[in-house]
Amino acid sequence: MRMYDLILKKKHGGVLSTEEINYMIQGFTDGSIPDYQMSAMTMAICFSGMDERETVDLTLAMRDSGDVLDLSGIKGIKVDKHSTGGVGDKTTLALTPIIASLGVPVAKMSGRGLGHTGGTIDKLECFPGFSTEISEDTFVNNVNKIGIAIAGQTANLAPADKKLYALRDVTGTVDQMSLIAGSIMSKKLASGSDAIVLDVKTGNGAFMKKIEDSKALAKAMVSIGNMAGKRTAAVITDMDQPLGYAVGNSLEVIEAIHTLQGNGPKDFTEVVFALGSLMLQLAGKAADDAAAKSLMQSVIDNGKALDKLAEFVAAQGGDASYVYDTEKFPKASCAIEVRATEDGYVRRILAEQIGTACMMLGGGREKKDSPIDLSVGILLHKKNSDPVVSGDVLAMIYANDAKKAEAAKEAVLRAYEIGREAVSPEPVVKEIIL
C-alpha cells in the first residue's frame, strides 16, 4: 500500500477503505508518511469529500492513535459535553454541577482558551489552588465519589488529530466538514464517556458562521458518535451575540455561580437547560424534556447544584469559599463605561469582536503560551433588541491597563449595531439534532 496511490484515488473522487484510512493515519502519526503527502491528501479530501463511513473510519483511526481512557471503573452512564466554542460560553461551570447533583457522572476533558473564545480550564483556575492536572486514578475516584471531575487533555489523547490539525491550519484545509467532525469527535471518543452532548454554536462569534454549516457539522458529529456506539445528541445554539452578559474569566465564573443560585441570564440559563435535558435523557434519568428540566430546576432551588460546584472545586484543590462569596474573586484596577452615541435599539452585538476586545485586555490568548489575566473582561449592559438612548451604558470594561482599556472600549462600541427599528430577538436554542 502506498500513500501516493491513496492520494490519486481520493483526488479522482474514490472512496478510501477502512484499511487504507488506518494505514494513512498510522503512518502519518509515526512519521513514515511525510507532511507533504498528508497535506496533498487533505486538499484532495477538501475537493472530493468523504462519505459517512469514511468519516467514521477517519475519526476512529485518530481516536486509536493514542490513549483511549478506560472509565469502566466509574459506576453509571458517563455523560460528556462539548462546545464548539463561543464568547461568554461558561456553560460547563453551571451545567456539570447540576447534572452531577442529579446522580449522573460527568467525566470531562477540557482545554484552555485560544483566540477570541474562552477555555474552561482558565475559568476554573480563577479558584485559587484549583488544578486540572490530576492522575487518572484521582479522576476516576473523584467521579465515583462526588459525580464530577474535569481534567486537562493528556498529550497522548488522539495525537494524530493534534498533528493533522497543525498541518491543516497552515495549508488552508481546516474548513472541510469530515475533517472538522473527525477532529472534534476523535478526542471526545478517546475521553471514554458513554454518552456525548454537543453544543454547536452558530453565528458571528462561532467557528461556523452559517446555520446550514452548523447543522451539517452537528449531524455529522451525531452520526459519528452513534455509529461508534456512543449515545450522542447535539444542540444548535446562537452565537450572534455573547452568551449571557459576562465575558472574561472571573466575570464568567461569577455569572455561572449566579445561575446556580437561580439568578442567571435568561439566554445562558436556556442553553444550560437544553444541554442538561439531553444529558439526563441520554443517561436514562429523565423520560422527556419537561421531566429533565424540572429535575434541573429542583437542584437549583434546593441549593444542591451550588453545593456540588463547591465540592468539585475543593476535590481538585481549589478554594471552595469563593463559590459562596464571589467578592473574593480578584478585581481589575479600573472600570470604564462604554456609552451609546445614538438612540435606537440594539440590532446585533458582534460576538467575535467582543471576544477580541477581551483578548486585547489580556483575558484571552493570541498564542498558546500567552499569559492571561483572569480578572479582566467585559460586562454587557445592553443586548439584542434592548432599547437604547444616547448616553446609556452599553457595557463596562474591566482592565488593569489604561491603554488596553481604551482600545477595548473602541472595539466594544464598534461591536454594537444600533438601529432605529426594534428587532425580535433570535432564539438562543435553534435546533436539537438526535
Image: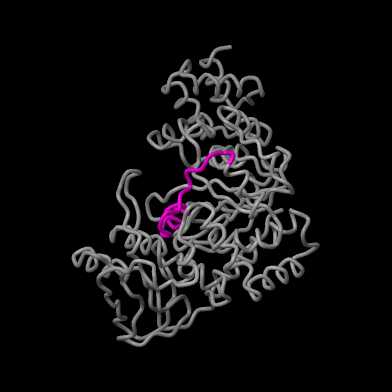
Image location of residue 98, percent across then percent down: 63, 64
Q: Which residues are magenta?
A: 118-137
- Residue at 62% from the left image edge and 43% from the top image edge: 140
- Residue at 40% from the left image edge and 33% from the top image edge: 171
Q: Is residue 410 magenta?
A: no
Image location of residue 160, percent across then percent down: 51, 29
Quadrant for the N terminus in the image? top right
- Residue at 45% from the left image edge and 63% from the top image edge: 88
Between residue 375 and residue 91, name the one nearer to us: 375
- Name the quadrant containing residue 315: bottom right
> With respect to residue 341, does 415 lie above or below?
above
* Residue at the extreme left: 403
> With respect to residue 26, does 50 lie above or below?
below
102 with respect to 356 (left or right): right
**Magenta span: chief secondary structure:** loop
34 with respect to 395 (left or right): right
Between residue 105 and residue 227, name the one nearer to us: 105
Q: Is residue 136 magenta?
A: yes
